[in-house]
Image: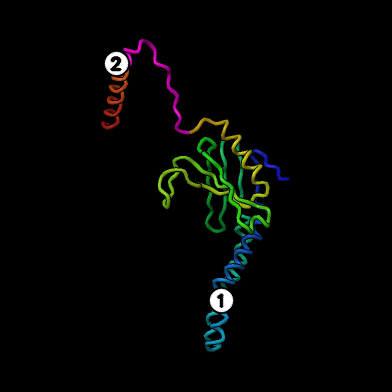
Amino acid sequence: MVNWKIGEEFNPAKQLRNLYFIYFVITIIFSVLIWYIPLAFMVASWITLIISVPLLLILIFVIYWIPKFYTSISYKLDSEEVEWRRGVWFKNTGIIPYNRITNIDIAQGPISRMLSIGSLKIQTAGYSNPNQGWGNSSEITIDGVEGFEELRHIIMDRVKGKKPVGVQTFEEPIGKPEDLPERIIDELVEIKELLQKISEK
């Protein structure tokens, strides 16, 4: 059983690294070997060699890069936010306050299911995604989690204890109902004065 402690970083399960390698092998088989093997029989050996050298370099690079990328991934649950880090040469970090989280979806493909891991896709309010526009979208994904259901409950329990961002509270109207239009006019006058002060700056 995985234990997540508030304020302590945790890394994805080791199965995530295996998943990356499995995806890599599948990509090689269906994107490279299906044309490389027939081509090797049809063209001269020196052409095959020219093609093979860069392919071999790419294979070596990816085999080196996958473990490096895996070890660069870390997550942390603080008292107020979720933090993530990843990246081998270009480091990426991000922080999402619990009060911006609207929902957490679980994603698990067939290979992930065999490896007993899943991903948590954290949905936030008002996040801009270039492909989806404004609205609710997945801002970060916590990949390679063994007890993903348990982690989802831990985060959502913290979300429920936070006031949603952008929520405002309004006092009940004081006085008689017939005074309400007058109070609305007063509010509008204040807003107008405030806008004038902003435009003068």
168 in magenta: yes
Q: Nearer the viewer, mark 1 or mark 2?
A: 1
Task: Check disc 1 and give the amino acid type.
Answer: Ile
Residue 38: image location, x then y, percent: 55, 82
Q: Quadrant of residue 45?
A: bottom right
The residue that appears at 73% across and 45% down in the rendered structure is 1
- Which residue bears the numbered disc 2? 182
- Which residue bears the numbered disc 1? 34
Residue 185: image location, x then y, percent: 28, 19
The residue that appears at 39% across and 12% down in the rendered structure is 174
The local secondary structure at tag 2 comes to: helix
* Mark 2 residue crowding within 10 angstroms, few (<14) / some (14–19) / many (20+): few
The local secondary structure at tag 1 comes to: helix
What is the residue that sits farthest to the top in this orientation? 176
Range of magenta residues: 165-180
Q: Earlier in the sequence, mark 1 or mark 2?
A: 1
Q: Quadrant of residue 198?
A: top left
Q: Determine the CA span between mark 1 and mark 2.
A: 77 Å
Task: Check disc 2 and give the amino acid type.
Answer: Glu
